[in-house]
Image (cartoon, rainbow, N blue to C red):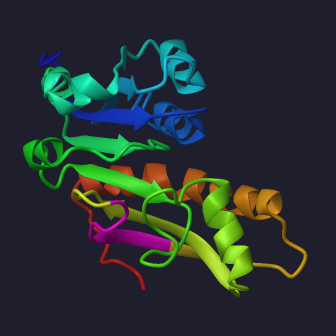
Amino acid sequence: MGTSSKKNIVIFASGSGSNAQRLLEQFENHPAIQVAALFSNNPDAFALQRAENFNVPTVVFDRPSLKDGTVAQQVYAYEPDLIVLAGFLWLLPAEFVKAFHNKIINIHPALLPRFGGKGMHGQHVHQAVLDAAEAQTGITIHYVNEHYDEGAPIYQETCPVRPDDTCETLAARVLSLEHQHLPRVVEELLTQEKQTPRA
């Protein structure tokens, strides 16, 4: 695990893992970066199969092992340079966040600080955006701290909210932004070509 000179990404995912898929594709043959492992709190997550398709090790864990530090030890073994939460729905314990200070990022399907917080994921976010009659929405890639969606922003990208949008059409438009920008931002963070956050 520590034999490669490549930068290591550890992905955390709870569901289908389409963002995980994009990261797996982006870094499959990358000269300097690799996905070292995918962790999931859901044994039925399709993200696990996606990782296995790329011969990337997978780890399934439960809440007690996350809280007691077992998962942190398992993650340490992969020597992560960056931990990417790609559709991971649990709040990470403060001890875990401290152990990997400034090495954990998340992608959120809205323009934080609005439409974030506990329970604000997936369709809940898009419905809230529609209910608020927003003119635009988008994505926020941000560092993770011990509170839901409150870490410092790294990158934001916007897209319009159209008058005839449904949760499904809005979700698809936002997801395409996620797939487009997450691999690029991860690559920039790991090659130190950091961009200043966009408003």
Seen as rendered, the residue at the extreme front is 64
| Residue 67 or residue 188, whichever sits in front | 67
The N terminus: image quadrant: top left
| Residue 18 or residue 66, whichever sits in front | 66
Residue 42 in picture, x, y percent from top left: 48, 24
Picture residue at 56% right of the left edge, 62% below the top: 109
* Residue 171 falls inside the magenta stretch: no
Quadrant of res 126:
bottom right
Picture residue at 24% right of the left edge, 30% below the top: 66
Residue 117 in picture, x, y percent from top left: 43, 64
Above or below — where is 154 with respect to 38?
below
Quadrant of res 135:
bottom right
| Residue 17 or residue 176, whichever sits in front | 17
The C terminus: image quadrant: bottom left
Above or below — where is 142 with respect to 199?
above
Above or below — where is 183 with respect to 195?
above
- In this rendering, position of residue 96 left or right of residue 40: left
- In this rendering, position of residue 175 left or right of residue 190: right
- In this rendering, position of residue 78 left or right of residue 44: left
Residue 59 in view (yes/no): yes
Residue 36 in view (yes/no): no
Question: Which region of the structure is painted magenta?
Answer: 148-156
Picture residue at 42% right of the left edge, 77% below the top: 113
| Residue 136 or residue 130, whichever sits in front | 130
Residue 174 in picture, x, y percent from top left: 65, 62
Quadrant of res 155:
bottom left
Picture residue at 20% right of the left edge, 32% below the top: 67
Residue 76 in picture, x, y percent from top left: 13, 27
* Residue 155 falls inside the magenta stretch: yes
